[in-house]
Amino acid sequence: MTVLLLAEDDEDTAAILVHVCRHAGLTVFTAADGVTALEMVDASCPDVVLTDLVMPGMDGLGLIRAVRSHRTAAGTPMVILSATDDPVLATTGVCGVLLKPCGNEQIVDTVERLAIRGPHEHSRSGAHCAALQPARA
Ligand SMILES: [Zn+2]
């Protein structure tokens, strides 16, 4: 069973994503801020973390940095959920960026592909890893 941690402070967005992902058979934990999300990384060992950028307290970029330097969870696949395609997002050490609004299938497909891929290294310079790139023929 794939465990997804969703860090999202907007209740409506979180509710929709939780519904979509649970419907697809994922186990979903949610956190409304980065600090709570980081605690849940410890508590629930998620296969994949999907994070919003703007959250109270520790924001999405802070959460990504914290997970990437985590003792045991540093390789956890992470995806940013963002409304804007800011160039800075290409240097954050995640697997990819999902632009809001994105289709339900795209979200579930992304999470499942990353769960299959499992934990992996991410460069400190922060370029997106290759986990979400199409397999070469
Ligand atoms: Zn990755």
Image (cartoon, rainbow, N blue to C red):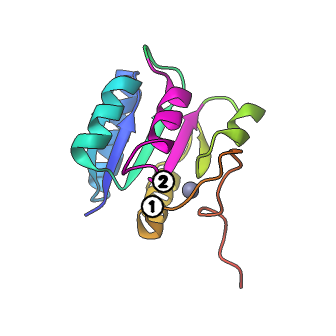
Rendered-image quadrant of the C terminus: bottom right
Identify the image quadrant of residue 38: top left
Would you place residue 88 above or below residue 18 in this image?
Answer: above
Give the image location of residue 15, x and y in percent: 32, 32
Would you place residue 25 above or below residue 37 in this image?
Answer: below
Please name whichever residue, 119 or 11, is drawn nearer the observer in this view of the structure.
119
Please name whichever residue, 67 or 2, is drawn nearer the observer in this view of the structure.
67
- Residue lying farthest front? 71
Q: Is residue 116 left or right of residue 42?
A: right
Q: Is residue 20 left or right of residue 55?
A: left
Q: What span is in magenta?
A: 58-82
Q: Crowding at label 1, few (<14), some or many (≥20) Cα neighbours within 10 Å?
A: some
Secondary structure under tag 1 reads: loop
State which image quarter holds ligand 1: bottom right
Instruction: Kindly identify the amino acid type of the residue bearing the numbered disc 1.
Output: Pro
Give the image location of residue 79, x and y in percent: 53, 45
Give the image location of residue 69, x and y in percent: 48, 41
Q: Is mark 2 within 8 Å of ligand 1?
A: yes
Please name whichever residue, 5 or 125, is drawn nearer the observer in this view of the structure.
125
> Can I make out residue 29 in this image?
no
Circle 2 residue: 77
Instruction: Kindly identify the amino acid type of the residue bearing the numbered disc 2.
Output: Pro
Q: Is residue 122 left or right of residue 127?
A: left
Identify the image quadrant of residue 129: bottom right
> Can I make out residue 68 in this image?
yes
Would you place residue 43 above or below residue 13 in this image?
Answer: below
- Counting residues from the start of the chain, the first of labels 2 and 1 encountered is 2
Are discs 2 and 1 less than 8 Å apart at CB?
yes
Q: Residue at x 48, y 65 (%)?
A: 113
Circle 1 residue: 119
